[in-house]
Image: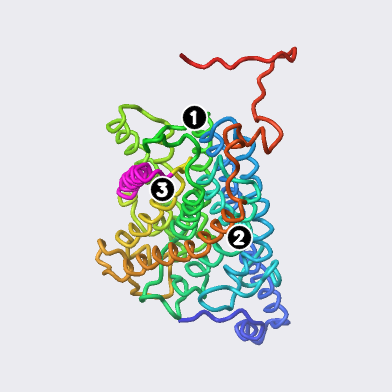
Amino acid sequence: MASPSCSADTLALMFGANTTNAAGAAAFICDQFNTVSTKFTDTAYAVDTTYLLFSAYLVFSMQLGFAMLCAGSVRAKNIMNIMLTNVLDAAAGGLFYYMFGFAFAFGTPSNGFIGKHNFALKSIPSSDFDYSYFLYQWAFAIAAAGITSGSIAERTQFVAYLIYSAFLTGFVYPVVSHWFWSVDGWASASNLDNLFLGSGVIDFAGSGVVHMVGGIAGLYGALIEGPRIGRFDHSGRSVALRGHSASLVVLGTFLLWFGWYGFNPGSFTKILSPYESGQYYGQWSAVGRTAVTTTLAGCTAALTTLFGKRILSGHWNVVDVCNGLLGGFAAITAGCSVVDPWAAVICGFVAACVLTGFNKVAEKFNYDDPLEAAQLHGGCGAWGIIFTALFAKEKYVNEVYPGKPGRPYGLFMGGGGRLLGAHVIQILVIFGFVSATMGPLFLILHKLKLLRISPEDETAGMDMTRHGGFAYVYHDEEGLPMKKIEPT
């Protein structure tokens, strides 16, 4: 039975005829209740906005992780170059995502292919979006651009970085994110009026939208440029061009791990959402579960890589373990909110195997990616999409994506094959769209001789030839040159 509304007329009737100024007393009581109710509403907005902003800050901190990971994975003669590209991924990405990208991604109402409102944040804040949502999505966009920069490191002209980064964050990534995350997107799980194959695509935090896009873009850049000088000998055998600092690789990995807790749990965008009022279990529980599945997938992938590399090479290799860990994170990103922790362990194990397999294929075809970005983000991201379609749990799917009871869930969990079909199509369309956009862009830059640096510059190192000097200066206090002592 519905409770009576708090109105002066209703309460005045309850007070009875003997109450002095019953209408005034009722109005006073109603005003107090309405004030309290408004304060609770304000508090809910503040809590959710604070949660989203904090998540955005965590995701943005991943840029520092990318920078350290990239710096440690390249040779010392190219540190200034790779650090500058990481800074400009964020700076150029910020402007282009502000002017065009956010509108293409989330400008609503729109068609299923691309958004068409809110350019340069016009009409924001609104009932649909506040500034915090833009900041969070911008942090995702520049993460995709950062993935690509690793694939083409140590041999790419600086102007090419600026061009591809602007195009990727201003158009390519926003269009893909519109398809799968906007309420109008043709394959979005939130498009309740027109769910693709009855389910939509469950790519919660972007194994496909972010990681596959960045990885495939990097794949085409590295393929068109070709390998670094000396990466393969005249007979085609692989020659290791090791990064100069495993310490920076480990530092970058831990920073990325920390930021992933904003990347995956933060993708709820709200935390103050009870599934049933007055209960201990609510969206805050789903947020915690998402952090746990993210952690377990990365940990399992790291340990699998550790022992796998020991068997294959005879060494305990920290750099390989770090890449394996990140591969597990990239894979779990799609299904982190809709699977059980035990399933995340399976996800991480297979992700490590996928990464190792793709690295072997890349070596066989003389493909050179200094950070294994295409294999890690592209390959493990694709596995994560398939994994979600196999292990998504019905209860979690209905909680995270409400409003459409009975939607399909994981094949291995008894949910049928429609979700798997939708996810296979997602992989194909992402690969096709990024190939059709970033591939020609890199090819045009190559034809215009704007993509790869000269062999002389590459041999000397871009820091000296393009950026005014090396990142590391070896001098004592009196200004006399010191020699680096190489291990025997």
Spot occupied by residue 14 in the image (x, y as percentages of width and height): 60, 83
Of the two numbered discs 1 and 2 in the rendering, the one whose residue sits closer to the viewer: 2
Spot occupied by residue 284 in the image (x, y as percentages of width and height): 47, 56
Q: Magenta segment, principal secondary structure?
A: helix
- Count of marks, rendered view: 3
**Which residue corresponds to mark 2?**
167
- Hey, which quadrant is residue 68 in on the image? top right
Highlighted range, magenta: 345-367
Taking 334 as reference, is 133 left or right? right
Within 10 angstroms of label 2, few (less than 14), some, or many (20 or more) residues?
many
Whichever of callouts 1 and 2 sits on the residue coming sooner in the sequence is: 2
Nearer the observer, 405 or 412? 412
For image coordinates 53% across by 38% down, the residue present is: 69
Q: How far separated are the C-alphas under marks 1 and 2?
A: 32 Å
**Which residue corresponds to mark 1?**
246
Indicate the secondary structure of the residue bearing disc 2: helix
